[in-house]
Image (cartoon, rainbow, N blue to C red):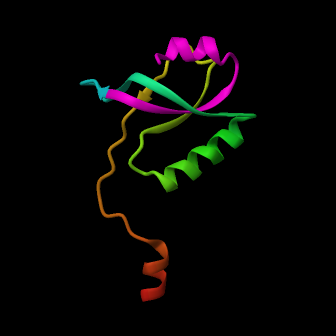
Amino acid sequence: MQWNEIRTAYPDQWLVIEALEAHTTPDSRRRLDRLAVVDTCADGSSAMDKYRQLHREFPQRELYFVHTSREDLDIRESYWFGIRMDHHAFANSA
């Protein structure tokens, strides 16, 4: 589905969506070409909770939580540099 189709089918709702096809523009904006609705949620908090749960289970999937009142999806990529470290491993080694 396209974002405008999702907005029509799910008016004024919080959703968890998945990008099935997407690309990044030269100005680091993520363009979601084809989407799927994963879940509908009662409010923003439950949408974020559902997103976190799914992201932990399926880290390879490109998931977002959004409200359909947004006319456009303005998603910008962030680049993280450095080393990721498990806080518990660090705390236990000290």
Q: Position of residue 44 (x, y in %)?
A: 69, 36
- Position of 73 compared to 26: left or right? right
Q: Is residue 44 above or below residue 49?
A: above
Is 39 one of the magenta-colored residues?
no
Between residues 62 and 1, which one lies in front from this camera angle?
A: 1
60 left or right of 92 in image: left
- Farthest residue in the right direction? 42
In magenta segment, residue 18: yes
Identity of the residue drawn at 70% across and 19% down: 12
- The percent coordinates of residue 66 (x first, y second) are 58, 29
Q: Position of residue 61 (x, y in %)?
A: 42, 43
Task: Say which residue appears at 29% left-offset and 53% top-offset.
Answer: 81
Vertical relation: 82 (above or below) 43: below
Q: Quadrant of residue 13?
A: top right
Inspect this view and state whether residue 46 appears. yes
Residue 94, visible in the rendered structure = no
Quadrant for the C terminus, please: bottom left
In this rendering, is residue 6 above or below 86? Answer: above
The residue under the point 29% across, 28% down is: 24
The spot of residue 15 in percent (x, y) is 62, 31
Which quadrant of the figure has residue 8? top right
Which one is in front, 9 or 81? Answer: 9
**Which residue is at the far left?**
26
- Residue at position x 57%, y 50% in the image: 52
The magenta span reads 1-22
Number of numbered tags placed on the structure image: 0
